[in-house]
């Protein structure tokens, strides 16, 4: 069974992946409130959390194996791994909002959906 915490971690990782990191200050720097909506799979229906963007690098204080980057164009990719759980995502950030898609797995369970972001 997929737990809320494992799904949140997977969704978070999906949000931010492997686009080249911007150096110095980024137009996207600051906190973003994220909402992940599950459209397919046995995951919870939604997840909410906040990430920080600094110099194009996206971080979350409680996730160790989390990688996320925002390109100068606003393209964002992220991934996260926690034990046998993995998620990744991609999308686009704008000045005050953002959106994209995510997918992941926990053991053999597969889930996917979309995410939205608002500047905090």
Image (cartoon, helix red, strand yellow):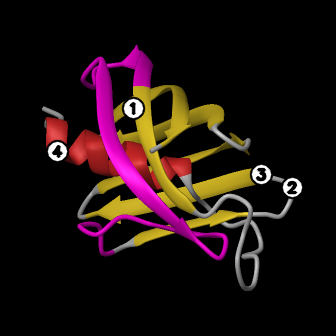
Mark 3 or mark 4, whichever is nearer to me? 3
Q: Is residue 26 left or right of residue 11?
A: right
**Mark 4, secondary structure of its residue:** helix
Distance Cα–Cα, label 1 vs label 4: 15 Å
**Residue where numbered disc 4 is placed:** 5
Q: Name the side, left or right, on which 7 lies relative to 53.
A: left
Q: CA distance from mark 4 to mark 2?
A: 31 Å
Please tell me in which quadrant of the rendered image residue 102 appears. Answer: top right
Q: Which residue is mark 2?
A: 73
**Which numbered marker is on residue 75?**
3
Answer whether labels 3 and 2 touch (C-beta < 8 Å): yes
Q: Residue furthest right?
A: 73
Residue 81: x %, y % from top left = 36, 63
Q: CA distance from mark 1 to mark 3?
A: 25 Å
Label 2: which secondary element:
loop
Question: Which residue corresponds to mark 1?
Answer: 110
Which residue shows up at 31% across the image and 43% down it?
49
- Lower position in the chain sequence, tag 1 or tag 3: 3
Residue 52 in the image, given as x and y percentages of width and height: 45, 62
First in sequence: mark 3 vs mark 4: 4
Depth check, mark 1 against mark 3: the one in front is 3
The answer for how far apart the CA atoms under marks 2 and 1 are is 30 Å
Say which quadrant the C terminus sits in.
top left
- Residue shown at the point (43%, 38%) measured from the top left: 34
Q: Is residue 106 visible?
A: no
Mark sitting earlier along the chain (1/4): 4
Q: Give whichever of discs 2 and 1 has the lower sequence position.
A: 2
Could you give the CA–CA distance between mark 3 and mark 2, rounded to whole angstroms? 6 Å
Query: In the displayed structure, would residue 86 be above or below residue 99?
Result: below
Residue at image x 23%, y 64%? 83
């Amino acid at each position: 069974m997929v737990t809320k915490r494992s799904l949140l971690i997977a969704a978070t990782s999906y949000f931010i992946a492997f686009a080249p990191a911007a150096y110095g200050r980024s137009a996207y720097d600051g906190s973003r409130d994220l909402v992940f909506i599950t459209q397919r799979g046995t995951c919870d229906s939604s997840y909410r959390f906040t990430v920080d963007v600094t110099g194009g690098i996206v971080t979350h204080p409680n996730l160790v194996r989390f990688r996320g980057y925002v390109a100068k164009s606003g393209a964002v990719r992220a991934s996260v791994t926690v034990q046998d759980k993995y998620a990744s995502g991609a999308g686009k950030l704008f000045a005050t909002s953002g959106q994209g898609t995510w997918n992941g797995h926990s053991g053999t369970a597969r889930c996917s959906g979309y995410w939205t972001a608002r500047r905090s």
